[in-house]
Image (tube, helix red, strand yellow):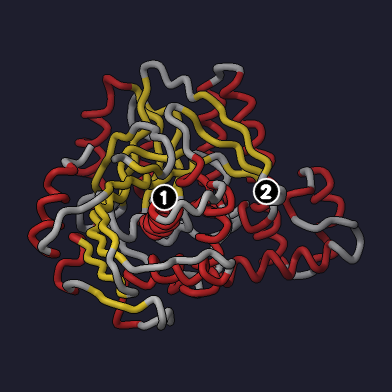
Amino acid sequence: MYDINLLKSDFTELFKKDSESVFFSPGRVNLIGEHTDYNGGNVFPCALTIGTYAVVAKRDDNKVLVHSLNFKELGVIEFSLDNMVYEKEHNWANYPKGVIKTFESHGFNIPNGFEIIFYGNIPNGSGLSSSASLEVLMGTILNESFSLNIDMVDIVKMCQEAENKFIGVNCGIMDQFAIGMGKEGCAILLDCNTLKYSYSKLNLDGYKIVIGNTNKKRGLTDSKYNERRSECEDALDKIQTVKNITALGELTEKEFEEVKDCIGDPIKAKRAKHAVYENQRTLKAVKALKENNLELFGKLMNYSHISLRDDYEVTGIELDTLVELAWETEGVIGSRMTGAGFGGCTVSIVKDECIDNFKQTIAVKYKERIGYEPDFYVVSISDGTRKLG
């Protein structure tokens, strides 16, 4: 865990006053179930021990002053509660600003401003949801600081709304949900259609989750995310002419095969196939975990990556290289891309005694092929966003 005292002393130095409270919001990794969330399917994420920290003090006026140690060059960003609009020059601060604006639009009174210093140890642009971590962190700060008594699921929904409407990124609910509702030692099976969820204990005895960062930066708004989403919506529209469903996630593989021809467009049919098959893979993977069949869980992770590569086409040479090298390396149960794709991270389950060799061997081979090194993080599973003190 990051040394909070460093953040507190930075706060005192910058704002010439003591901080009042400390918060933490994790990053997340999705073990399986990619690009299913906005298709009404299931996902299986967990919250991580890396994340975003904040130290906070309230003010007597309506000004909000925020500073991020990750973007020191941008200095202190100041805005007023009376003027909550998206401003490009406010950069990362539009995320917390969007959450405040969304809370207010839902009728929650934010009576005064505050000063906050943020620090995140989630690699920026890695696909481990630094933006959602920041959003749910801001939502929790508002909830705790002003005794709003909002249920975490409602905080999660408002944070997703902030990203959709204020930031303009058409994300699903998974990132915010996993970050807000995380539970130590557990992954969450979440039905994104109904928000029905259950916790599954991860019995990884002798194994660890290893995140591999391709170090290829990608911006979600600049990616083909919205294009893929649109392709799936078009496919769903066509299927709805012959079958009464509200989301692709409602179909089994067999049902999809029976109706896929009505989609008409082979590319859109591939996108829809991924959404349907990935959802079913996720359910099979959770069942495998419950039966302590880690080997089958790993195989399903591998199949997930192949589908994301071939049917959904969101991987790219960096992710494919990192995953394929993992498949060839001793002690790896399974490996796949995680997140939106087009760069970002992979998630692998690796035998404890093989982790050092895994990192060293893959780093060398990846650099030979790609030209620069990846980074690796051995992570544990954390509780969700919370006040630390």
- Image coordinates of residue 264 in percent, x first then y, are 79, 69
* Residue in view at x 39 percent, y 34 percent: 382
Task: Out of 235 and 290, give the one closest to the viewer.
Answer: 290
Q: Which residue is mark 2?
A: 41
- Amino acid at the residue labelled 1: Glu
Q: CB of mark 2 within 8 Å of CB of mark 1?
A: no
* Residue in view at x 63 percent, y 58 percent: 38
Q: For the residue labelled by badge 2, is the local secondary structure a helix, a strand or a loop?
A: loop
Vertical position of residue 336 compared to residue 314: above or below:
above
- The reply to whether residue 129 is visible in this rendering is no
Image quarter of the N terminus: top left
Q: Which residue is mark 1?
A: 144
- Image coordinates of residue 286 in percent, x first then y, are 60, 30
Is the residue marked by circle 2 packed among few (<14), some (14-19), or many (20+) residues within 10 Å?
many
Task: Out of 93 and 227, give the one closest to the viewer.
Answer: 93
Q: Earlier in the sequence, mark 2 or mark 1?
A: 2
- Quarter holding residue 141: bottom left
- Image coordinates of residue 112 in percent, x first then y, are 36, 68
Q: Is residue 73 left or right of residue 323?
A: left
- Amino acid at the residue labelled 2: Gly
- Quarter holding residue 364: top left
* Residue in view at x 78 percent, y 48 percent: 250
